Amino acid sequence: MGKRSNLKTKIHRVVFEAETPAGKAFDILVLVLILASVVTIALETVTAFRREFLQYFIIIEWGFTILFTIEYLLRIYSSPHPFRYIFSFFGLVDLISIIPTYLSLFIVGTQYFLVIRVLRLLRIARIFKLTKFINEGQVLTKALRASFTKIAVFLGTVVLLVFIVGALMYVVEGAASGFTSIPKSVYWAIVTLTTVGYGDIAPQTPLGQILASLVMIMGYGIIAVPTGIVTVEMSRLDRGIGNTRVCPNCHLEGHLLNANFCYTCGYNLPPVSA
């Protein structure tokens, strides 16, 4: 039992962390495979390549999928709480990145959803110990969580605004100017308020143009609001220095090398070894 536990700990350090040479080498290998897999999927969509090398693409893709499946199973095996890993963000990404190949046996075309593997490249910061980027990423995540309620209220207000403006524009312009329904007028209001401006629909009457001008001006101010909310929250957060050390219990990273317990769940962290 002790040997098995020790093996799981060693595997955990290799597949989940990048603080050791073995862990870094493992993550670099995985990322190289991810890049190669994504490139293979992209090339397979080129008609000339697909016609000439289809069988090779199929063999290569199944090879990648088998390797990623083994990696996924190792992560589950080495985790003290497998279900927490499975339902974590990276756990779901790891699972989704291998499912399409197996589904392609029953549903043609689903293998192209494997481009989701590119999300796994988010692990790259862990490999090269870019702790500054990891830290700032954690700060941004916390700021977004803290800002969620305010941003939700703000977006709700924007939705009401575009419905009101859309309804007004429908009444002012009507079908003669392309505003054939309130939903289409709301679409115009969203495009205008976000300053995208496709130009497929435009007001023709002076009153409609005045209303459109007001919506455009409001658009610049509205874009700045969520940015300001998140910026304020970020300035309140403490930017402590972390690294790629992962808690085996909750799978959060950013623990100091000399930390004994997880800063989130209080789990007793295993010592860092070379």
Image (spheres, rainbow, N blue to C red):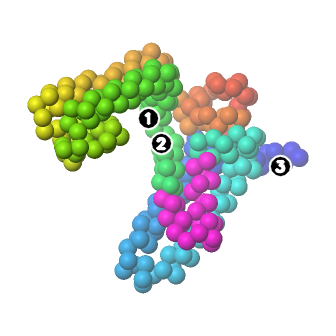
Q: Position of residue 209 (x, y in %)?
A: 14, 32
Comparing 215 with 19, the one in front is: 215
Magenta: main secondary structure: helix
The part of the chain drawn in magenta is 92-115
Label 3 and label 2: CA atoms lie apart by: 30 Å
**Label 2 crowd bin: few (<14), some (14–19), many (20+), radius 10 Å:** some
At label 3, the amino acid type is Arg
Callout 1 secondary element = helix
Q: Are marks 2 and 1 in contact (CB under 8 Å)?
A: yes
List the residue tagged with mark 3: 4
- Where residue 125 is drawn, which disc sits there? 2
Local crowd size for mark 1, using a 10 Å CA cut-off: few (<14), some (14–19), many (≥20): some
Q: Residue at x 58, y 62 (%)?
A: 100
Q: Position of residue 246 (x, y in %)?
A: 63, 37
Q: Is residue 36 above or below residue 93?
A: below
Q: According to the image, label 1 marks what residue?
A: 133
Q: Provide residue 143's location: percent of width, then percent of height.
A: 47, 24
Q: Which quadrant of the structure image shows residue 168?
A: top left
Q: In front here: 137 or 132?
A: 137
User: Viewed as shown, does residue 37 lie left or right of 219?
Assistant: right
Asked which secondary structure carries label 2, the reply is helix
Q: Toward the viewer: 146 or 72?
A: 146
Q: Position of residue 50 (x, y in %)?
A: 43, 78
- The residue at 49%/40% (across/down) is 129
